[in-house]
Image (cartoon, helix red, strand yellow):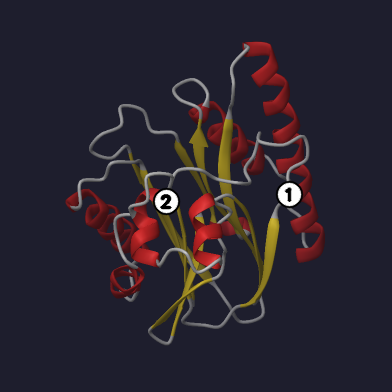
Amino acid sequence: MSGVNYSAASYSHVGMVRKINEDACLELTWDGLWAVADGMGGHAAGDYVSSLAVDSLRQLPIIDGLDDFTLAVRDTLGRVNHAVREETVRRGVAMMGSTVVVLAARGDQAVGLWAGDSRLYRLRGGRIERLSHDHSYVQELQDSGLLNEAEARVHPRGNIVTRAIGVEDRLELQAVSVQVQRGDTYLLCSDGLNKTAEDHEIADVLGHADPYQVVRSLVHLGLTRGAPDNITAVVVKAN
């Protein structure tokens, strides 16, 4: 695999306030596929959508080329979006949806795909970089210069996403191509983490070698801040 091997771990927690965990995650390191989905719409809606997204990705066949693999991920999530739209009508509810962020890798090449405000980060050389860009109301305010990061984290409309599975008839996934280097650490997380911890705090934890200890520490960090939302983290290390 072009000299790059991957190790990973995942951890999800309901948090300190919510009764239902509407997050779901996927850790298929042997197949170079990782994902986090954060459901919306309340019990029996949000958790249904996030689980459907992750379970559908889990059933993908092994595909060698990254371009074909990425296309299969897009097609799968597109079908999930269609199924969710139909299920929303069948149940007669106002909204069922889920954010999603995916990392797909083949050797030292990877692609990040996302819709919503679940995030993809990279730690390289001790420096953290957000590779995804939130599809959210507060991100639009930030882009316009009306909010800073700290204000966005506590904004009363911080839970409004502008793109997600189930929101529109056609799912629009944003993508980023990634040249992986040995020593890189990648983090996929739901907003329950980044709304309770700042990027520099996340970076400090990501620097540790063991992915399992990293995900446990990240979730613990969120829990010490009260964890008003579900928290999910998937950490991928390139060795």
Measured as percent of width and height from the top left, residue 157 is found at: 43, 44
Number of callouts in the render? 2
Residue 232 in sight here: no
- Which quarter of the figure is the N terminus placed in? bottom right
The circle on residue 172 is: 1
Q: What's the amino acid at mark 2?
A: Asp
Disc on the earlier residue, 2 or 1 = 1
Residue at image point 73% right, 52% down: 62
User: Where is residue 232 shown, x and y percent of the image?
Assistant: 39, 48
Query: Going 53% across and 50% down the picture, which residue do you hit?
Result: 137
Note whether 51 is above or below 172 in the view shown: above
Residue 190 screen position, x and y as percent: 44, 50
Which amino acid type is shown beneath numbered disc 1?
Answer: Glu
The residue under the point 61% across, 60% down is: 32
Q: Which residue is drawn at 37% across and 48% down?
A: 192
Considering every residue shown, the one lying at the far front of the view is 146
Q: Residue 191 carries which label?
A: 2
Image x and y of residue 188, in percent: 48, 58
Residue 206 is left or right of residue 114, and the answer is left
Q: Is mark 1 on a helix, strand or loop?
A: loop
Q: How would you rate the neighbour count of disc 1 (Cα within 10 Å): few for under 14, some for 14-19, many for 20 or more?
A: some
The answer to whether the residue labelled 2 contacts the one labelled 1, judged by CB atoms less than 8 Å apart, is no
In front here: 104 or 50? 50
237 and 187: which one is in front?
187
**In 3D space, how far apart are the residues under numbered discs 2 and 1 (Cα atoms)?**
19 Å
